[in-house]
Image (cartoon, grey):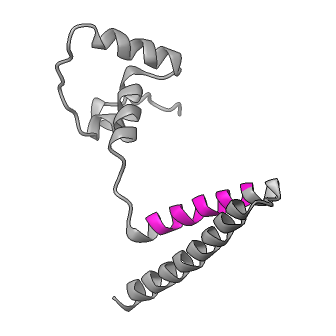
Amino acid sequence: MPKKWQFATMSDFPSQRQDKFVLRLPDGMRDRIKAAADENNRSMNAEIVATLEAEYPLPRSSTDEALWLLGELDKIRGMLENEKPQSPEALALQAYSDDISKRLKAAILRQAFDDAKE
């Protein structure tokens, strides 16, 4: 027996369950958003959301922040290692980044231990 076609209702789409917000835009702003969206190959909605995400990111936990900083320090150390620093300033920066990295790792372990106790 052939399958019957089943039509989706508007509530079947995830976008229908997301928060909605009506917004009044100043003259010309819609055109600027449209131009930026076209340039980035995305919808106007996606362009607006991306802009808002960049301006209002989700708050990071202290552990997430520490992990991010650790990653940044690793990048700095990697750049310094690739350049084979010889100057006293570069060597001091390398030592400083190593010290911060160790302290961040210790802080992350303490936070994880504290989280496990709760």
Give the x, y percent position of residue 76: 66, 57
The vertical placement of 53 against 89, above or below, is above
67 in the magenta segment: yes
Give the x, y percent position of residue 27: 22, 8
- Left or right for 107, reference 32: right
Query: Picture quarter containing residue 98?
Result: bottom right
- Left or right for 104, reference 10: right
Give the x, y percent position of residue 1: 53, 34
Q: Nearer the viewer, residue 82 or 106?
A: 82
x 38%, y 66%: residue:
61
Report the residue that reaches farthest toward the bottom: 117
Query: Picture quarter containing residue 82?
Result: bottom right
x 30%, y 30%: residue:
9
Tally the marks: 0
- Left or right for 64, reference 58: right
Report the residue that reaches farthest toward the front: 88
75 in the magenta segment: yes
Main SS of residues in magenta = helix
Magenta segment boundaries in residue numbering: 65-79
Query: Picture quarter containing residue 85?
Result: bottom right
The vertical placement of 69 against 39, above or below, is below
Q: Nearer the viewer, residue 90 or 102?
A: 90
Give the x, y percent position of residue 88: 72, 64
x 80%, y 53%: residue:
83
x 44%, y 27%: residue:
5
Q: Which quarter of the image is occupied by the C terminus?
A: bottom left
